[in-house]
Image (spheres, helix red, strand yellow):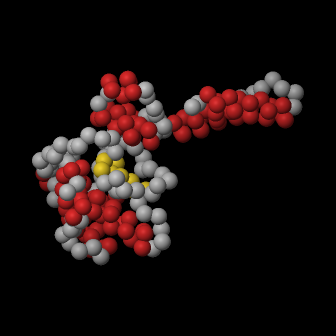
Amino acid sequence: VAKPKAKKEKSAVAEGLDLASSGKWQQTHQQLAEARGIPWPLQTPHELEKNPWFDTLSLRERENVLFLMNESATNRAMGRAPLVYGDLYHSANRTPSSGQQEVPTILPSTKLWHLERGRLLLGRELLHLQGIRFNAETMDKLSETQMTDLAGNAFSSTVCLSILIAICMELNYRTESESEQEGETSALLDHLAQNST
């Protein structure tokens, strides 16, 4: 995985905020910290200070990572599964997050942070999470940004498969009995399963 390039702090306009509301997320983050009993201002752990991926994030996104780390530690302390993913695109009070078994909805604007790896997921990784695979030659023709957009605009393969299964279940077969129809449906689903890999 290529090392990310550090970038300068984004302006309020680049963050997608107008100048009048640019301080609103800061106030929201401070209120969230107070509500959760987290000392303000948030302190960056030593391992993140040296993390080149963390350096590429805006201040708002960095604070989101710190809130996610705190929530994950709280989950662990309470015997719940720690967080693994968090979408940094949103403010901390509404950041979609999840554990190992599920992933927040992937949108074109997604900036999905992997807490265990300590980095953003690449576009090719987001495609894989959506169940979309390309050969290496095709992947080399696309930028990571294009792959992120494609992943965010794509139907998840599981959604497509569920639609296909629903269609198969509604097909009318020319069979003499219901058990024969169930056999035909099972054979079709087995065929789809074998040819989908």
Query: Residue at horizontal 58%, vertical 30%?
Result: 196
Q: Position of residue 23 (x, y in %)?
A: 16, 59
Q: Position of residue 125 (x, y in %)?
A: 39, 40
Report the front residue among 97 and 190: 190
Q: How many marks?
A: 0
Position of residue 193 in the picture relative to residue 9 (left or right): right
Q: Position of residue 165 (x, y in %)?
A: 64, 35
Question: Can residue 149 be seen at all in this image of the molecule?
Answer: no
170 is higher (above) or lower (below) than 67:
above
Q: Position of residue 49 (x, y in %)?
A: 19, 59
Query: Residue at horizontal 79%, vertical 35%?
Result: 182
Report the front residue among 29 and 55: 55
Question: Can residue 43 be seen at all in this image of the molecule?
Answer: yes
Query: Residue at horizontal 87%, vertical 27%?
Result: 176
State which quadrant residue 14 falls in.
top left
Q: Quadrant of the C terminus?
A: top right
State which quadrant residue 30 falls in.
bottom left
Report the front residue among 191 and 151: 191
In the displayed image of the protein, which residue is found farthest to the right? Answer: 176
Report the front residue among 1 and 68: 1
Q: Quadrant of the N terminus?
A: top left
Query: Residue at horizontal 16%, vertical 46%?
Result: 6
Position of residue 178 in the picture relative to residue 68 (left or right): right
139 is higher (above) or lower (below) than 123:
above
